[in-house]
Amino acid sequence: MRIMRVTALTAAALAMTATTLSAAQVATAADFSVTANGVASGGTIADLPASSTVQMAVNNLPAGVGLYALHCLVPPPGASPVPIRCDAGTGTLVYIMAADQAQTTSRPIVANAEFVGKNPNPQTGDTGTTDVNCRVDTCAIYTLGAGRDSTNRAYTKFFATEFAEVGPQAEDWAVASIRGQIIKGAWKPRVSNAKASNFVVTLKSGLSAALESDACEVSQKGKIRALATSGTCTVTISSPGNDEWAPYERELTFRLTK
């Protein structure tokens, strides 16, 4: 399988040409091995936190061979063994570019318990996405050869991932204030189109709140300004939560003035 990812890997990186090697540089596919957090291929990396860094230790990757590592949803029984729903988040792809001599190296890869799964090879025409929850679905870290070695099963390795169960999550709460006054109840503060006001939001959890609005300009730096001179705007405060804190959302309404 020829892997193409959001990281904009070039065709040249995917199709490495052969290199003339000295005897000391030669390693064969049979010499190649890889472990994940010390676990051998076919094993299970257990009790992982919701977002984990797994260390991939690659041994004797032959000269001229590139290698990928990805965290993916395991295809169902009877389907093609090649994964088509993999995590495209930050740090979730390892790519070892082919070199002119054998490589032994260690690289980190991020494995998330929940992710939006995308096709790592969109050239097949499948551009859909799937929400993946590895506490319910079966997931694994795969290694795959790159370019001309994409179909060489010697470089295809499999490490099942199991994530620790999430305990009860605490309920979060936002405290929002405008011009130094806490916004409570049904109060709809005025927001000027001519001048920005101080607008501060903090979450009980200490997590960072996301702020979105339909007719106001809000910033993480603590300012709010109306984008019209009349009517209202709604500001949505949200947080995705984490293992300790539940997701949170709250809407505030403001009156727009000149």
Image: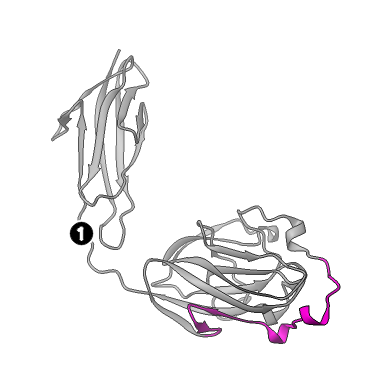
Stretch in magenta? 17-42
- Relative horizontal placement of residue 154, taking residue 255 as reference (left or right): right
Location of the N terminus (image quadrant): bottom right
**Residue drawn at the location 33% of the way across and 23% of the way down:** 225
Q: Position of residue 245 (x, y in %)?
A: 25, 58
Residue 70, relative to residue 4: is it above or below?
below
Query: Which picture quadrant has residue 171?
Result: bottom left
- Relative horizontal placement of residue 196, taking residue 143 as reference (left or right): left
Q: How many marks?
A: 1
**Residue drawn at the location 67% of the way across and 59% of the way down:** 4
Q: Position of residue 24 (x, y in %)?
A: 78, 81
Location of the C terminus (image quadrant): top left
- Residue that badge 1 annotates: 170
Pointer 1: residues within 10 angstroms few (<14), some, or many (20+)? some
- Relative horizontal placement of residue 228, taking residue 96 as reference (left or right): left
Magenta region includes residue 40: yes
Query: Which picture quadrant has residue 32?
Result: bottom right
Q: Position of residue 139 (x, y in %)?
A: 48, 73
Residue 161, relative to residue 222: is it above or below?
below
**Residue drawn at the location 52% of the way across and 62% of the way down:** 92
In this view of the protein, which residue sits in the foreground, 105 or 72?
A: 105
Magenta region includes residue 113: no
Q: Residue furthest bottom?
A: 30
In this view of the protein, which residue sits in the foreground, 164 or 103?
A: 103
Query: Which picture quadrant has residue 17?
Result: bottom right
Residue 223, relative to residue 39: is it above or below?
above
Q: Position of residue 129 (x, y in %)?
A: 53, 58
Q: Is residue 74 visible?
A: no
**Residue drawn at the location 57% of the way across and 63% of the way down:** 93
Q: Secondary structure at mark 1?
A: loop
The residue type indicated by label 1 comes to Ala
